[in-house]
Amino acid sequence: MPDYPLHQLIADIDRALAPEDFDAAARSALAAFDDLNAGMIAERKVALACGAGCAVCCSLRVDVLAHEVFLIADHIRREFTAEETDGLQQRLTSHAEAVLPLTPREHATRNVTCPLLQDARCSIYEVRPHACRRHHSQALAACQYTYDHPEDLETPAAHDRELFRTLTAAMRENIAAYAGLGFDTTIYELGTALQEALDDPAARQHWRNRHEAFIRASVTPTE
Ligand code: SF4
């Protein structure tokens, strides 16, 4: 596991000045999360049904923190061509038009394809958020059922419970690190928050000033 304990994350965020500093801390935390994930999968011999090119779960609502959104936005600004950015902006607009009129629960009961999905692959895979990294399945049939019946929120998940529980605890620790330093840890919906981050560079400064990062993005209630 990469040696990136929580106290190191907190210290790095606390002394971060530039966007690159915040992004570096977020990347290190994601790398440690991946290692935890891979280690548990090996230890528990979890038989994943997931594989490259399968994107059935990329129509679910994705919850993110602001620091994850800024990492993705910076990656897009750096790595995407003008043509790729134009295409993404169009998909983000369609996505926002579909999502913003819905309550989070209504969104959760519909398939709305993630605007970052391209040719059945994640276009920002290396900086995808914790929620996407935590998501896994041991039965493709269960994923397909969820896709075919998005209104059925009672379907038992096909994940490994212990793995999911441990990864969720790690995600909560990550959130607590930012919350402890006074940063906005509102749970935002990925597509609508990303559109705002790309459209409004001031969003990051609001967040750094310990204000809410996004004002138009869809918010997932925590209770
Ligand atoms: S960010 Fe990537 S992995 Fe996550 S839902 Fe979107 S396309 Fe899928």
Image: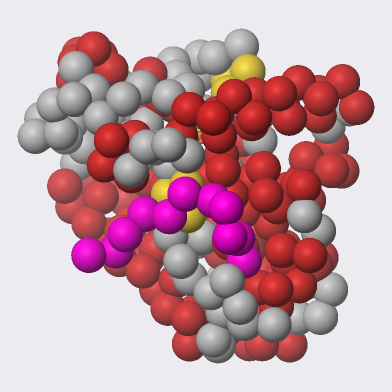
Q: Main secondary structure of the magenta part?
A: loop
Q: Is residue 138 visible?
A: no
Residue drawn at x 73%, y 87% is 15
- Residue 17 placed where, x, y %? 81, 80
User: Magenta includes 220?
Assistant: yes
Between residue 127 and residue 148, name the one nearer to us. 148
Where is residue 182? Give x, y as percent.
54, 86
State whether residue 42 is above or below residue 74: above
Q: Which of the 4 image quadrants contains residue 133?
A: top left
Residue at left offset 87%, top offset 20%: 83
Asked whether, in this view, residue 85 is left or right of residue 46, the answer is: right
61 shown above or below 138:
below
* Residue at the image position 42 percent from the left and 78 percent from the top: 176
The number of numbered badges drawn on the structure is 0
Residue 85: which quarter of the image?
Answer: top right
Q: Is residue 27 above or below residue 110?
A: below
Q: Is residue 31 left or right of residue 173?
A: right
Residue 164 visible in the current orientation: yes
Identify which residue is drawn at 61% across, 11% down.
Answer: 119
Magenta stretch contains residue 152? no
Scheme of image coloration = secondary structure
Point out the stretch of residues depicted in magenta: 213-223
In percent of width and height, residue 200 lies at: 77, 54
* Quadrant containing the C terminus in the rendered view: bottom left
Residue that extends furthest to the front in the rendered view of this protein: 101
Q: x%, y% of residue 46?
A: 25, 36
Residue 59 versus residue 8: which sits nearer the camera?
59
